[in-house]
Image (cartoon, grey):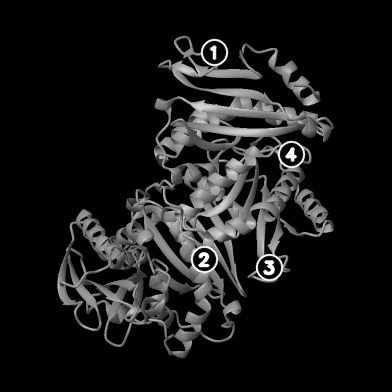
Amino acid sequence: MSVLVLPTHVEQFITQLRAGLDYYGCELAVAEDRLATPQRSILFDVSGSECPTTVWLHQTARSLDSPAPEFRVRAFSVLRDEIWPEVRGQEGAFNRFATLAALTTSANNAEVGCQALLVPQSNEVLAAFIATACKHGATSLTQAVAAVLSDSAAAEQQSAWGEADLEALHYAYAHLGTGQLRANCWSMTVIVGDVLGELTIATTANNPYFGGGLLSTLRVSKECLGFRTRTLDTNALNQTVLLFDNTPVFGAWCDDGIHIVFVTFVPNVLKSVNSVLPHLIRWAQERTQTIHSLALTASEGSPPNDD
Amino acid sequence: MTGEVARSIEAQLARHRLQRIADGYRLVVGDAEDACWDRAEHLLRESNDILGWTDLRYLPCDQGQRASGLLGIAEVETEFADKRVPVFTAYGIEALNAVSVHGAFYVADGRLRLRAQYSLYADDPAVYLATRFILNAFGEQLFFGLGIAQGAVSAESLAAQRTRMDVPRAWRTHTSAGHFKEAAARFRRAGYVATSGQSSFCLEVPLEGAAITQMADPEATTALLTVSTEVPHPVAGAGYLATLVLPLHLTPDRSVEACQRLNALEMMHHHFVPRLGSWGLRGLDDELVYTTFVPAAEPLEGLEVTLMNWNVLRARNVKDTYWSELVEMTLTDAAPGVPE
């Protein structure tokens, strides 16, 4: 590790990430330490994952001269060469089964990735989600699609979250006046300016890879984003949010025709992590706020100047 | 204590075996045979099987207050037996207050307590309702308080409390959406921006500036008030939930300090709306919210409007009395010594 000192919360995050990976039998090893360079970054290799996986921790460009440096973490698994030609152009269909990472393709490869800005209060959730994404992000997606195509989905497993969790959530956010509780599902309307998002958090027993967990979807009408008649390329959108979004990206955007939908699946194994549900809600609120400009960026191909 | 509400309470309590204390009654829950009290009703030795006790006291008011129609204050306070409740940090207490029922949690003399107050007036227009609120708080405060405190420890513990309480979690008959539409219209006629849904209605109370709603101006400084009937309490089940959110962004230390202060100040008021809920912290951003939950197995005529009225008066009181102090707290660090 570099002699340069990282902020305490970043050091703590790395420790928590190592512990999370250890739980899955994976290890984090420094591949390149560039903390002393102007880029201020560290590249880690993750061993024990089925696909080659790297974690890249770097200071954001906008904070390089700041007294309060801001760090972003990105985790990517590269799909095997023989897979990517098959998934190219099918990202939308694949991403419907996204768990904690998004599939994106380029001319040369296909990756499954996630990213987040590090904030001290969210270290536990971020480390647990990234560790799980490193181990299962790519496999859960490809195997889920394979299972559905071969009609051999995983056995159902009861969600670790239940009625009591959703009721407590409904109560905790009742002061906003926009939540609704139904059987096995809680939803909330998020309105930011002209953009209206519908967040749904549902207990799920039949994820094709994991079985039980929590399915979170944020549905935003394409019309309110100005894409009623224009095409919104969700592959470009996922590439954009993985690069620039200030909201953590655990999951993927996909298209259901009328809406774009951000899908996250949180497996049962993460039930013991503190504050998962409040984080899903906060991220949905932030995502609703930023999706308009990010969708425009994705469609125009010019990055926002904020990273 | 005189007055119709007090007489009604006395009549109902006369049927029960209760310990008499100065100015009121004590309900000890658990086997209190070994418990030992001094003459001032302080506990000298705690029984192994005691869960805690709830006092209903009538606090007198002075001559001037009596002249204005106030008869006194009914105070319901529970002290929980030490070994029955987990230890909470100051922050934990205010998070607990976001789900409290029948009052506000606080710690005094190292012991967790829950306290509610109801000002009694000579011309109370709703004697039945006042009697019901006070007696329900007296009878349920300890059970729900214990369930909430123990349920806060883990998901398993919460599940156990829900099973133990075994209360209805929904009404058999629902209030119609028209009911809430009419309630919202009533407040609109009074000059507030109010909207209604299937089982709830909400309105905004301006706290500063000319803007009256965030729907038109996202920068408007307004308190958001809601009353819902289909938001079951995680422990207490079906009932009425009323909330009041203040648009403040405080540091965690400052949020705790603000909650403690607001809860303490409300208990010092004599002429004030009932203090049946508490200021507490909600969500990752520690939003400052006053929450009142009224457990009810079935609808109570007009209660949604009553609860909203109370919170409108509460919001106006914050605006007139504490708002500038609270805004000041957003600009400064916490005072030293505020516990974690």
Query: Which is in the foreground here, disc 1 or disc 2?
Result: 1
Q: Is residue B159 visible in this depiction of the protein?
A: no
Residue ID at (58%, 85%):
A229
Q: Are marks 2 and 3 on the same chain?
A: no
Q: Are marks 3 and 1 on the same chain?
A: yes
Tell me the tag on residue A30.
none
Disc on the earlier residue, 4 or 1: 1
Crowdedness of circle 3 by 10 Å Cα count: few (<14), some, many (20+)? few
Question: What type is the residue that disc 2 sits on?
Answer: Gln
Label 2 resides on the chain identified as A
CA–CA distance in space, label 3 to label 1? 58 Å
Disc 2 target residue: A285
| Image quarter of residue B73 | top right
Disc 4 target residue: B271
Tell me the tag on residue B39.
1
Question: What type is the residue that disc 1 sits on?
Answer: Arg
